[in-house]
Image: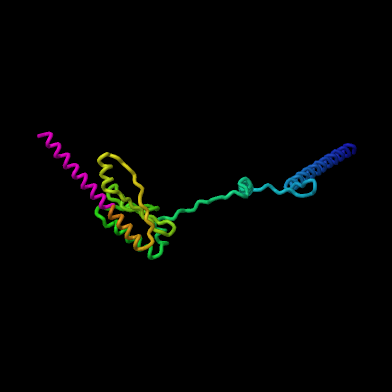
Amino acid sequence: MYIALIVFMVLAAVVCIFAMVVVIVDLVRGGDKRASVVYAQPAQTADGAENEAPREDSEVQTDTVAVAETEAKEELGENTVVISRTERKTLDEKFRELDERMQRYYIEIVRHAMNKPASKQFKNDRYEEYKIGNTRLVRLQIKKDAVICEVTLVNSDFRTYMADNKVRVKQAPTVIRIEDEASVELAKNGIDIAVKGVEEEREYKRLLRNEKRRNARKLNS
């Protein structure tokens, strides 16, 4: 009987210990859950306001750029004028914006220069130019809805002087603003004078070569 009592007490003690262990384990698990919940909630400041949750990197970068732009504007000041670059219109775009009369004047001058013997066209986004060799006949530009022609008028005697003395002088072109038929004729006459100057220079060089040959033959005879 004593042995049975002892065994019963031992079993009761084991059951009590097991029950205590189960209770302790439940308490530990419950505490971890409450701790995780507290961590997930936003922290509160001393006055009870909740702090914002951590934001994404893109939001932080956007705010940084906005702050930088604001600071840049403040550094410029109210009296600073910011000038933005605008795209420059091409010659063809400007031509399309001309009225019909100015387009007709432009084409008439171009055809006059183009029909000259050995005339070559050089064109870019800023101007259209016609040359014979290195001599410019005319350069056409469009500025503020107006056709501008540049012609170089060189006196034949002055050209001969430069050739004889091997002097190179860059002469400023004559600028003609095309406004009516009279200015168109003036530009065309300037082209004719330039062509005549080219022909005179070629003839002068031909005579000079012939003279050198005669002198060479005299020395060899």
Q: Position of residue 111 (x, y in %)?
A: 30, 59
Q: Is residue 142 visible?
A: yes
Q: Check the image and report above or below for 5 versus 50.
A: above
Give the camera-side residue of 67 and 124: 124
Span shown in magenta? 194-221
Q: Residue at x 66, y 48 (%)?
A: 55
Q: Residue at x 25, y 52 (%)?
A: 196
Q: Position of residue 98 (x, y in %)?
A: 41, 62
Give the camera-side residue of 155 and 130: 155
* Residue 186 belongs to the span the image colors magenta: no
Q: Residue at x 44, y 55 (%)?
A: 89
Q: Main secondary structure of the magenta part?
A: helix
Q: Is residue 61 visible?
A: no
Give the farthest residue toward the top: 220
Q: How is the image coloured?
A: rainbow
Q: How many marks?
A: 0
Q: Check the image and report above or below for 178 versus 171.
A: below
Locate the N terminus by quadrant.
top right
In the rendered structure, the answer to whether residue 218 lies left or right of residue 66 reads: left
In the rendered structure, the answer to whether residue 30 lies left or right of residue 221 reads: right
In the rendered structure, the answer to whether residue 96 lies left or right of residue 132 reads: right
In the rendered structure, the answer to whether residue 67 lies left or right of residue 158 reads: right
Give the farthest residue toward the front: 157
Give the farthest residue toward the right: 2
Give the farthest residue toward the bottom: 100
Quarter holding residue 164: top left
Q: Position of residue 108 (x, y in %)?
A: 32, 61
Q: Residue at x 80, y 44 (%)?
A: 27
Give the camera-side residue of 67 and 22: 67
Locate the C terminus by quadrant.
top left
